[in-house]
Amino acid sequence: MIIGDRLCVEPGGTLYGDLQVPGDKSISHRAVMLGSIATGTTEITGCLMGEDVRSTIAAFSAMGVSINARENGQLSIEGRGYSGLNPPASQLDLGNSGTSMRLMAGLLAGSGMSVTMTGDQSLCARPMRRVTAPLGQMGAIVDTQPDGTPPLIITRATDLHAISYELPVASAQVKSAILLAGLRACGRTRIVEPAPTRDHTERMLRAFGAALEVVANEICIEGPQELTATSIAVPGDISSAAFFLVGAAMVEGAAVTIKNVGVNPTRIGVLEILRLMGADIELSNERSTGSEPLADLTVRGTRLTGIDIPAALVPSAIDEFPALFIAAACAKGRTRLAEAGELRHKESDRIDMMAHGLEILGVKLTTSADGIEITGSERGFRAGRVASGGDHRVAMAFAVAGLKAAGPIEITDCSAIATSYPGFVDSARQLGLKLAAI
Ligand code: S3P
């Protein structure tokens, strides 16, 4: 089903059955990017064919890379090496995709090409100095608008040099941008993380034959290095699974198994937080794609209890907080989140966007600069009309709230769901959510 602008979820129901979620968005982007600069033919299976990854595919196609992408997520990329990229004829429009823009800033910074990258209204409001500052230290010429937002303008530069950089924020996108620039730069680039963030770039660089050293919170890469084409099987996206994990966890009698989900230790904060709230989650069939671990996840509904979310779990659950706030609103007692100011810099300000909608649905809460405190109630939500602000994860989170609502919930601006989960409405209905486009 094509997702329209508005969705309506009828109250009640349960979630039951098996599901396969689409490919992991972070891993899909990286597979396309590294396949495009490797030498040889890279075959990808399970690639997410959502709008964000399509933006990355379109960008590399515009730079002369031959990419045969099928709707079922099978891609064949004819990489001609890093120097095989050609300057694009016009600016690259990356739509809603922050991952595309930030990672490509690093990847293209030393390419010797002048490239302008832009995006939609949401992307053009997101902070980019976090990548342009370290890239500038490496000798790249990358400019933003005066307020640090896109369009991002890369001016021809080839001779990048290695840097040692302590990330001021825990951000996999910034780390990855520096690593991808470090792949081209002369010398040893060293990155220190304040907390572990998703390590898909490190794993995938190795799968493409690159050497890098990871010791505790330090990652070092010696440049320049060339990549060799490989085969990548993309696991299901735990960030997409999260909506149904939360939905099933908060409804007694629900039982859902989501198959082939990526369970990289840097991404499973949502499982750990739900378990601390009392959720019954089981991992089975644990295996590996070669570079990434995956498993089947089974959730059975129980009563959830509010918790103080450990700050150490914030980076590994950073995209799952919209869904987790729905769980918190249905849990017994208070849930407190702090040290999560990064949520204000996502596709929307996810603290304010979620708080606004939750209040409309009758939830008691207070927000702070870096978090939220939600007073849960097993009564759940009242009926209402909430805005998603064009943020895919906010829209999907409010859809799941319908399971515990007293009346219909209408959600506006839902078309962005297609950026990460084009089949969301079908999946939700398949499991029993009474969701419809209106
Ligand atoms: C991503 C990293 C995270 C996450 C985003 C995808 C990635 O962003 O929120 O959806 O693929 O590297 P930050 O690195 O900015 O936290």
Image (tube, grey):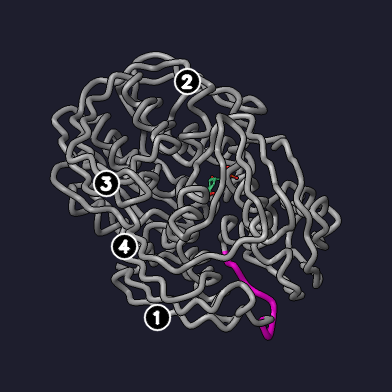
Element type at marker 3?
loop
How far separated are the C-alphas under marks 1 and 3?
40 Å
Which residue lies under the disc numbered 4?
46
Judged from the image, the secondary structure of the residue bearing numbered disc 4 is: loop
- State the separation of the CA atoms marked 1 and 4: 14 Å
Q: Find the distance from the CA under tag 3 to the CA under tag 4.
A: 32 Å
Residue shown at 39% from the left, 53% from the top: 24
Residue extent of the magenta highlight: 88-95
Residue at image position (57%, 35%) is 351
- Specify whether residue 272 is painted magenta: no
| Lower position in the chain sequence, tag 2 or tag 4 | 4
> Badge 4 local density, few (<14 within 10 Å), some, or many (20+)?
some
Residue 432: x %, y % from top left: 18, 47
Disc 2 versus disc 4: distance between alpha carbons? 32 Å
Q: Which residue, given by chain and number where applicable, does mark 1 sit on?
A: 68
Of 75 and 274, which appears nearest the observer?
Answer: 75
Q: Earlier in the sequence, mark 3 or mark 2?
A: 3
Q: Name the mark nearer the viewer: 3 or 2.
A: 2
Amino acid type assigned to the residue bearing label 4 in the image: Gly
Q: Amino acid at mark 2?
A: Ile
Q: Is residue 90 magenta?
A: yes
Q: Nearer the viewer, residue 291 or 175?
A: 291
Q: Compared to 131, does 275 lie above or below? A: above
Kindly report the distance in space between the C-alpha atoms of the residues bearing marks 2 and 1: 43 Å
